[in-house]
Image (tube, rainbow, N blue to C red):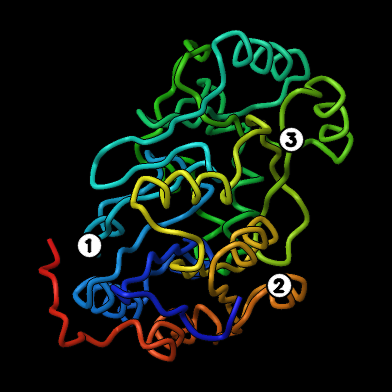
Amino acid sequence: MSASPASTASNRRIIFVDVDGTLVTYTNELPQSAVTAIRRARAAGHRVYLTTGRSRAEMPAPLWDIGLDGMIGGNGAYVEDDGHVLLHQHLSREQCGRIVDWLRTRRLTFYAEANSGLYAPPDFPAASRTALRAYAAGKGRADAGDLEASDIFPDLVLTEELVREDVNKISFVLSGPEDVQAARRAFPDLLVGTWGGRGHEALFGDVALSAANKVEAIDVLLEHLGASPADAVAFGDAIVDIGMLRHCGVGVAMGNAAPEVKQAADLVTDDVEQDGLAHALTRLGLTAVTPAGPREVQ
């Protein structure tokens, strides 16, 4: 890796941008500086893909309205370019059924993330209230104490039909750290993780395919585009982003990233709340329209 984009004949870059903590703040605000910088980068001929743990159903219109070439979702389980699905790895119906049965036996509420939507049992709004409010408080939301599940997941479908064939990941509310270890023992063939707010202890666990990761998904997309990792620039803030920061020609860590993420990067920019993404794109010369010709952003 190098501290500036690698040189190629076309001088066009493939830019991979994490969402939470990189593109949007920990209170889920989208800085206008980031929107403007991404649009300028695309106008300069570069391609921009959001690369996130979110499923497609968790990508609201304001993100797509920035103007994007596609996305990598589910931490690498899903790859989309110009509306065409290049990869979609998801839990099988049998795996989904095993997870749902296990969670119900332990009386842990949960929601299933699919590209078609988010699905949860009818008890989810009440059973998840404490965890969701703690999560929102950890992200700095002033109204955290009044939030309901419908405020955080406005399109959540409440149903008893939760064993599906299109589920990317299942997230569940933790009753304690022992739930994580129990899940790992129950599902040794799957990847069990945890998540919560910034600087927060784990509030949720999740179960997904162990094969999914951002680096392999990036390679799928680069091969499709006829590009190489040297042509790519990656931006991230979380441990899960370390692989892609090292893999791409240039890896950029946000100022709010963990120390080990910063150590893996070629460049450390400002915090997401301090226009870090825009500053880095500009510093790397990715927002300037070159004489080779701008492209119209759709």
Q: What amino acid type should be assigned to the residue bearing mark 2?
A: Ala
Tell whether 181 sits left or right of 5: right
Taking the spot 81% from the left edge, 24% from the top edge, the residue there is 188
Taking the spot 28% from the left edge, 76% from the top edge, the residue there is 41
When the figure is inspected, residue 31 is found, relative to residue 203, above or below; the finding is: below
- Mark 3 and mark 2 residues within 8 Å of each other at the beta carbon: no
Question: Judging from the image, what secondary structure is the residue with disc 1 in?
Answer: loop
Tell whether 261 sits left or right of 110: right
Which residue matches tag 1? 67
Instruction: Identify which residue, 267 or 153, lies in the foreground.
Output: 267
Mark 2 or mark 3, which is nearer the start of the sequence? 3
Instruction: Identify which residue, 10 or 275, lies in the foreground.
Output: 10
Q: How many marks?
A: 3
User: Quarter holding the N terminus?
Assistant: bottom right
Image quadrant in which you'd find residue 275: bottom left
Instruction: Identify which residue, 218 or 223, lies in the foreground.
Output: 223
Which residue matches tag 2? 264
Q: What amino acid type should be assigned to the residue bearing mark 3?
A: Val
